[in-house]
């Protein structure tokens, strides 16, 4: 039985805990958070009466014989906590995205894990969402031909009068570029979108051009165009990541995001409807979109006909939370059996490079090549993210 310790007991920890609860191969034995009441509340919610509480993560690492550490803290804390965990001799570290606020920290984390024989995973649950995985299988088997472009559209909104989410309220660490590294939409949530586009296309970006509105409360509207690196015999391949936000748009209650994807191939087009707000999540109770035939999980236009997929998928399978369970179970198997996680430290570093390139592009109003984004360029200030484009 693998022994798991959580560093951080905030809102997202509920999702990360799901894959360990009632698991035959791993169990949460310790939770660390400076807010003891919050940590103990989570342990009660997860029905872990025997789990230990710690207010200091180094104390937890010293006192508990841990196999896996989940790091669920503000971005600027990830590096030190991951390096210390690696030196403590754990077998695997799962760190919340984005893995760090700059490439230097990414490199420190990767190096510490390599030196200590630790598996490092960046928690990118989108790659485990059942609808996305089915779409990936369809495009990999050539259903719509050779891929030419991918668009990931994030629709953000709050119903009129709803409170802003905690992470976007004035004074939150998420709005401090020194702690978050990036903006909350293009950088934090955007990690999912850069990662998803890279995974579906099967290659890294070569060049990015971004525009992010500088006068609105958040880093939106935003439009990021990217060109992927070419391979022998390939035609050009592109990505468009765009983010909208409205303070009068209910999706459907107080939540703020949903995602729609379009994948264009040489023979057809594949659309993916919804992600975060799909299925039977309690947070979205009453959302009619998932139950409407207008928004099937996947629709494909091919040879003049439209075919839908996963129409019979249950609401619980279509629930975004299922991606967390699948992601955690995959990591448990990697730690037990060996191998590499689907979203490794190297993968997380490459996504951070793309995010940095987008912010530098928007700051400097120019195209940015990914080859410009290096640890050396960071040191002399050539690829510094100076603003998160938020004006709350």
Image (cartoon, rainbow, N blue to C red):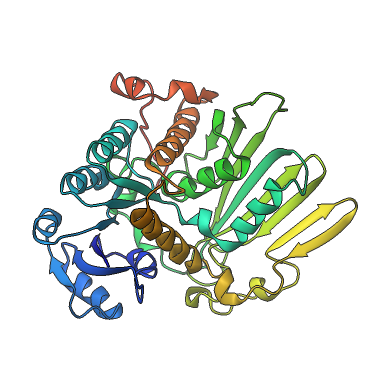
* Left or right, residue 121 beside residue 157: left
Q: Can residue 17 be seen in this view?
A: yes
Q: Nearer the viewer, residue 377 or 322?
A: 322
Q: How many marks?
A: 0
- Who is closer to the viewer here, 16 or 178? 16
Residue at 58%, 69% in the rendered image: 318
Q: In this view, does 338 lie above or below 41?
A: above
On screen, 204 above or below 325? above
Residue at point 52%, 26% (across, down): 365
Locate residue 153, reporting x and y percent: 61, 50
Q: In which quarter of the image is residue 334?
A: bottom left
Indicate the quadrant where residue 280 lies: bottom right
Report x, y in % for residue 224.
57, 37
Q: Residue at x 66, y 53 (%)?
A: 137
Above or below, 203 against 307 in this view is above
Residue 63 falls left or right of residue 380: left
Residue 353 in the image, given as x and y percentages of width and height: 43, 33
Which quadrant of the figure contains the N terminus? bottom left
Expressed as whole percent of the image width and height from the top left, the position of residue 202 reads 59, 39
Residue visible at 52% across and 60% down? 247
Along the line of sight, the residue nearer the viewer: 228 or 87? 87
Q: Can residue 222 be seen in this view?
A: no
Q: In this view, does 352 lie to the left or right of 239?
A: left
Residue at the far front: name it: 337
Q: Residue furthest right?
A: 304
Asked if residue 139 lies left or right of residue 118, the reply is right
């Amino acid at each position: 039985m693998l022994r798991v310790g959580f560093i951080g007991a905030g809102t997202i920890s509920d999702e990360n805990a799901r894959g360990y609860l009632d698991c035959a191969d791993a169990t949460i034995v310790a939770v660390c958070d400076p807010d003891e009441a919050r940590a103990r509340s989570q342990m009660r919610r997860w029905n872990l009466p025997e789990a230990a509480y710690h207010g200091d993560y180094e104390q937890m690492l010293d006192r508990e014989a841990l196999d896996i550490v989940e790091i669920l803290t503000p971005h600027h804390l990830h590096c030190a906590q991951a390096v210390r965990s690696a030196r403590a001799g754990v077998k695997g570290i799962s760190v919340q995205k984005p893995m760090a606020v700059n490439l230097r920290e990414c490199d420190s984390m990767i190096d510490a894990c390599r030196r200590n024989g630790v598996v490092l995973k960046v928690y990118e649950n989108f790659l485990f969402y059942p609808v996305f995985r089915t779409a990936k299988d369809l495009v990999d088997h050539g259903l719509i031909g050779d891929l030419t472009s991918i668009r990931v559209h994030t629709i953000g909104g709050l119903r009129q009068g709803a409170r802003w989410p905690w992470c976007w309220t004035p004074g939150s660490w998420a709005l401090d570029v020194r702690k978050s590294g990036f903006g909350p939409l293009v950088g934090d949530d955007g990690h999912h979108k850069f990662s998803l586009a890279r995974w579906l296309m099967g290659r890294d970006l070569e060049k990015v051009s971004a525009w992010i509105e500088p006068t609105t409360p958040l880093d939106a509207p935003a439009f990021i165009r990217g060109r992927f690196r070419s391979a022998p015999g390939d035609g050009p391949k592109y990505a468009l990541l765009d983010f909208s936000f409205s303070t009068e748009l209910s999706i459907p209650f107080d939540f703020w995001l949903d995602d729609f994807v379009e994948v264009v191939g040489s023979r057809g087009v594949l659309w993916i409807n919804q992600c975060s707000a799909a299925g039977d999540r309690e947070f979205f109770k009453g959302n009619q979109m998932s139950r409407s035939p207008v928004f099937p999980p996947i629709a494909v236009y091919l040879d003049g006909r439209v075919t839908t997929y996963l129409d019979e998928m249950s609401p619980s399978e279509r629930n975004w939370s299922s991606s967390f369970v699948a992601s955690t179970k995959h990591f448990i198997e990697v730690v037990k059996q060996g191998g590499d996680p689907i979203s490794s430290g190297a993968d997380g570093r490459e996504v951070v490079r793309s995010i940095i390139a987008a912010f530098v592009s928007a700051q400097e109003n120019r195209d940015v090549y990914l080859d410009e984004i290096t640890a050396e360029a960071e040191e002399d200030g050539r690829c510094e993210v100076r603003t998160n484009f938020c004006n709350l």
